[in-house]
Image (tube, rainbow, N blue to C red):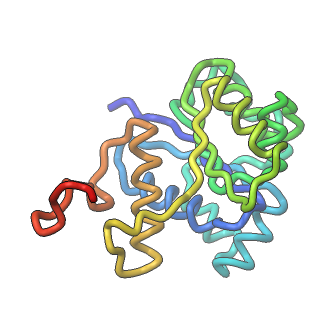
């Protein structure tokens, strides 16, 4: 069985739970191998928002890379990474990726995904957005990356925050080409809500 390789990067924006949940979901798939890189601000956010220890987080990944290890395998296009998600993606990391500024392993690995025409998903977290943010998102999109703000889907009537996180992460897995049944799918309006728009 050929395993698909995915890089999960966690940076200092709010929303560390998305990166952790993606690692958990991929860990449960037999044909997925995960590579993890966390920025220093990412570790602070993980501690503040989740209470998870570094050991707990690193245990979710198959391979863990230090953010300063620019010689790691995921920093080379010759190493077959099938997809990368930055979850969450800070505006600083977005700016570095948009400008090709690979000063650490996360931004270098993202640059590799773009130059090799592989799937890169950035779960950007900021609001409101200024013009620099929007221009950087446009630049990444023009290079083939996917900008994926973790916007909650209330139409599914989630019962909990975990339901919202799971639905968002399942959609990200869809973008990576990972088949999953980890969240409910939209099947159309229920009959009582159908009708012509006013």
For the image shown, how many numbered marks are present on the structure? 0
Residue drawn at x 54%, y 31% as measured from the top left: 119
Q: In this view, does 63 lie to the left or right of 27?
A: right
State the image coordinates of residue 27 (x, y, percent, origin top left). Answer: 44, 55
Q: In which quarter of the image is residue 194?
A: bottom left
Q: Can residue 36 be seen in this view?
A: no
Q: Can residue 97 be seen in this view?
A: yes
State the image coordinates of residue 157 (x, y, percent, origin top left). Answer: 33, 74
Q: Is residue 135 above or below residue 17?
A: above
Q: In this view, does 147 lie to the left or right of 109?
A: left
Query: Which one is in front, 25 or 162?
Result: 162
Task: Give the quadrant of the N terminus.
Answer: top left
Q: In this view, does 23 lie above or below 67?
A: below
Residue drawn at x 43%, y 43% as measured from the top left: 32
Task: Give the quadrant of the C terminus.
Answer: bottom left
State the image coordinates of residue 192 (x, y, percent, origin top left). Answer: 12, 69
Query: Which one is in front, 84 or 70?
Result: 84
Q: In this view, does 19 lie to the left or right of 159?
A: right
Q: In which quarter of the image is residue 78?
A: top right
State the image coordinates of residue 5 (x, y, percent, origin top left). Answer: 51, 36
Residue drawn at x 65%, y 48% as measured from the top left: 86
Q: In which quarter of the image is residue 84?
A: top right
Q: In this view, does 130 lie to the left or right of 54?
A: right
Query: Which one is in front, 188 or 149?
Result: 188
Name the residue furthest left: 191
Residue drawn at x 41%, y 80% as measured from the top left: 160
Q: In this view, does 34 lie above or below 195?
A: above
């Amino acid at each position: 069985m050929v395993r698909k390789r995915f890089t999960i990067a966690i940076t200092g924006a709010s929303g560390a739970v998305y990166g952790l949940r993606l690692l958990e979901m991929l860990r449960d798939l037999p044909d997925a191998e995960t590579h993890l890189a966390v920025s220093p601000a990412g570790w602070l956010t993980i501690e503040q928002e989740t209470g998870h220890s570094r050991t707990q987080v690193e245990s979710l990944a198959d391979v863990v890379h230090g953010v300063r290890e620019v010689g790691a395998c995921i920093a080379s296009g010759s190493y077959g990474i099938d997809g990368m998600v930055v979850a969450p993606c800070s505006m600083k990391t977005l700016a570095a990726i948009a400008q090709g500024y690979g000063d650490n392993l996360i931004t270098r690995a993202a640059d590799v995904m773009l130059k090799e025409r592989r799937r890169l998903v950035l779960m950007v977290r900021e609001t409101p957005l200024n013009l620099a943010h929007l221009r950087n998102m446009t630049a990444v999109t023009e290079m083939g990356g996917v900008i994926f703000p973790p916007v909650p889907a209330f139409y599914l009537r989630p019962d909990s925050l975990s339901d919202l996180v799971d639905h968002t992460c399942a959609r990200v897995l869809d973008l990576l080409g990972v088949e999953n049944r980890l969240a409910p799918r939209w099947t159309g309006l229920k009959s009582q809500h159908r009708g012509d728009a006013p």
